Image (spheres, rainbow, N blue to C red):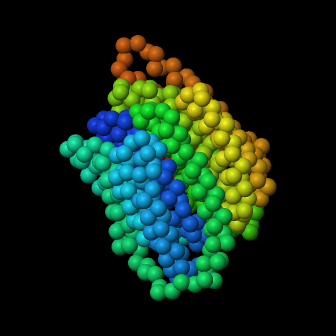
Amino acid sequence: MFWSLSDSMATQLTQFISGLILARILSPEEFGLVGMITVFVSISQSLADGGFGDALIRKKDATDTDFSTAFYFNLAASIGIFAILYFTAPVVADFYSRQELVGIERVLGVTILINAVCIIQRTQLTRRVDFRMQMRVNLAGSVISGVISIVMALTGFGVWSLVWRSIIRNLVQAVMLWYTNRWKPLATFSRESFRSLFSFGSRLLLSNLIDTIYSNVYFLIIGKFYSAAQLGYYTRADQFSRLVSRNLTLTVQRVSYPVLSQVQDENERLKEGYRKIIMAIMFVTFTVMFGMAAVAEPMIVTLIGAKWLPAVEYLQLLCFAAMLFPLHALNINILNIKGRSDIILRLEIVKKLLAVPVIVTGILLGMRALLIGMVVISVVSYFINAWYSGRQIDYSPADQISDIMPSFLVSLVISTGVYFLKFIPHLPPAVILVIQLIIILSMTVIFARRFRLQGYIEIRHILTERFPKLGRVL
């Protein structure tokens, strides 16, 4: 857990900082141009992965033949998908009426090929729960690509500095993964192995694909029906909100999936481990997401400048929409562990159909209506996920809510009070931001200790085990 969290936070914080610098150099429109392509590249990447990585992690007795079969399939699929992306680039450019997108999409598509050659390396590290090495690989890629992209932006490369940041990051990570994990594919492709992995991975692929389309369709809708600048505001707000919510989720998913898979047939141990995970993760998530919504305005102005002020409202609503994302993903994780990819696929179809009226409303009534609709979908989707996963381990949505409600209420009360500090007169935004952050952190620790929040106790245990001196502070 420690190394997985360190990986996610160090890597994403590095990307976040380079993104802040780039946001001061580049315009919202240039970020919007890359955002227009995001949906197509993300869908292509999801198709290329094929769900085989998760299938290999879950399979207790995976062999080199299994790994080699998955490697060759993913590589062949990636080449085909890249070719489709390359030749359809003019169609995408015509859709947005922005011809410069042709070159951008074709170059960004190269990341699909790069990722295809190292997907097994990542899978093997995850199976071994070796997140320390993954942290080194991911952090190196983020630092090197961030520095190069900033230099490119300063020397006038514009939107291409954002494009090459993705290419260089993935390339550095691929080289380091092959160097640090010395696995090589066998010269074999097993049909039996393929059928075994495909039976689980195919349904997972479809559910992941549906989720990817849903997660990125807003980029497409905003890019088509609004301006590139508005998409740029949305893109930056989305990256702020994802910094914690998505990365905490990724951290816990990567650790809990291979570890809990080992006790997939012991429901009591599985349930108890899962309860500890969600109480810890949601304590952090509620604290940060409520806090980020409260400090959104001084934070945006201080970090990336007043030209990004329209992104403040976007960020606040996205914080509420992203707040439950860890619970979505972790409930789906339980279904994965139990091998119920069939349920996952059906749930993804049902939940994503709920997005249709929200998208239509957003097109007709504007961005605010679209973002509010995303918050509503997030809440409804949680209850759908929790109902089905809860039946697998006897952990109902009501039980989950009971466990996380104390953390929710503490974070809500603290952040509501902190929000109104932005109206203090004659203080610069940076000073207000510092005051708000100090109060959020100090009051959260005080309240958590006073009410003995279980999530806080779990987090403190993890940190003090690694850093004993922190025990005196926490």
Residue at (37% x, 36% y) in the render:
29
Is 182 located above or below residue 100 in the figure? below
Q: Residue at x 37, y 51 (%)?
A: 102
Determine which quarter of the picture holds residue 182: bottom left
In the displayed structure, 397 sits above or below 205; it is above
Question: Is 232 left, or right, of 46 in this rendering?
Answer: left
Residue 108: image quadrant is: bottom left
Q: Position of residue 326 (x, y in %)?
A: 60, 48
Residue found farthest to the left: 155
| Viewer can see residue 155 | yes
Q: Position of 324 compared to 396: left or right?
A: left
Q: Position of residue 50 (x, y in %)?
A: 56, 66
Q: Residue furthest top?
A: 425
Question: Horizontal and vertical percent for residue 466?
Answer: 47, 55
**Residue 133 is at least partly visible in this image:** no
Residue 349: % across, % down: 69, 52
Residue at 69 percent across and 58 percent down: it is 345
Q: Residue furthest bottom?
A: 187
Instruction: Count the numbered circles shown.
Output: 0
- Whether residue 149 sits left or right of residue 270 in the image: it is left
At a point 56% along the width and 52% down the height, the residue shown is 212
Q: Nearer the viewer, residue 158 or 128?
A: 158
Q: From the viewer's side, name the closer residue of 134 and 454.
A: 134
